[in-house]
Image: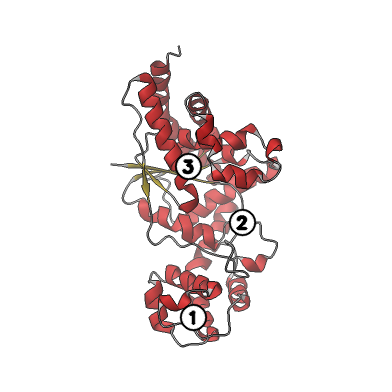
Amino acid sequence: MERIFSGVQPTGNLHLGNYLGAIRNWVRLQSQFECLYCVVDLHAITVPQDPLELRANTREVTAGLLAAGIDPTNNIIFNQSQVSGHSELAWIFNCVARLGWLNRMTQFKEKAGKRRDNATVGLYAYPNLMAADILLYQATHVPVGDDQKQHLELTRDIAQAFNSMFGVDFFPEPEPVIMDDAARVMSLRNGASKMSKSDESDYSRINLTDDGDTIALKIQKARTDPDPLPYSAEGLEGRSEAENLIGIYAALSDTSIAETCDEFGGENFSKFKSRLTEVAIARLVPIGEEMRRLAGDVSYIDSVLSEGAERARHLANPVLNEVKRIVGLL
């Protein structure tokens, strides 16, 4: 079976954007691929972290994956730092990748901002670690969003360069899995900005742990415009808040934007928001309840991560040993 690797940052406060943009699709992929789902805590420390919060966030994200329906028996769920092969292979890739490749990475420029000289080496070189994450398991496919396509291209470049440098055909060039129905979820307060946990207003996002009353209140307060809902997707042009809410409804109800416009075209937002609230509560509240239950069972979460790491090491060690042999390391 073809193998997927995908990682999630332990940022805490998983929200609707995380669920519709990635986690929901990971649940679907587990029946089609051999899947490794990794909480990438080594990537997290490329920027300052509170150690206690990092550990708590790692467990919270794991609880979210499990609550959403990812099966830890049939898939491998683990945190990156428990498998040392990620760091070892990343160093080897540091000696394969070129500075020019990393200089083109737009996410470093965005994350480092104007104080680029004060950014850590880890933040600059983390695309090499991302390549190691994927290639350590010789993954054939990687689910990617628009903001990760460049990093997957770098992974393919590194795989190709390694094979060429040492005259081998060892690493595959992993293919992207583009989820056609992956929702790009925007802020409930500003349709031009992505939904984010860093937004100061909690009303900008729906957290996976929000209860039904909180979800209802946030949808009620979500920004709209004065016009009725359009009859077609073309009528959403220039109406970012309307497009966002219709997109959320379509994703949560497993329908298309066109079907949603056909159903609600001409209606005012009050009626639509009422129906969106019903769908959101039905879909998200059970996940939130299960997530809170799992988060309270720290020993179980830790056992899932520990067992997953053991299974990941079983796959990773032969690959890393062969890489060391190819490179000439004793």
Neighbour tally class for label 3: few under 14, some 14-19, many 20 plus, Cα within 10 Å: many
Real-space Cα separation, disc 1 to disc 2, in angstroms: 25 Å
Q: Look at label 1 and name its amino acid.
A: Arg
Q: Position of residue 174 (x, y in %)?
A: 36, 39
Q: Residue at x 43, y 60 (%)?
A: 182
Q: Cα distance, mark 1 to mark 3?
A: 39 Å
Give the side of residue 57 with respect to residue 82, left or right: right
Residue position marked by numbered label 1 in the rendering: 275
Q: Is residue 26 left or right of residue 198?
A: left
Nearer the camera: disc 2 or disc 3: 3
Label drawn at residue 13: 2
Disc 2 secondary structure class: loop
Q: Is residue 31 above or below residue 169?
A: below
Which quarter shows the C terminus?
Answer: top left
Q: Nearer the viewer, residue 143 or 66?
A: 143
What's the residue type where badge 2 is placed? Asn
The colour scheme used to paint the residues is: secondary structure
Residue 311 visible in rendering? no
Rendered position, 88 above or below 325: below
Give the x, y percent position of residue 21: 47, 58
- Residue at coordinates 46% horizontally, 88% vertically from top-left? 266
Residue 265 to residue 55: above or below: below
Which residue carries the number 3 mark?
A: 151
**Name of the residue lying farthest toward the left:** 1
Which amino acid type is marked by label 3?
His
* Label 1 SS: helix
Q: 71 or 322, which lies in front?
A: 322
Quarter of the image with the N terminus in it: top left
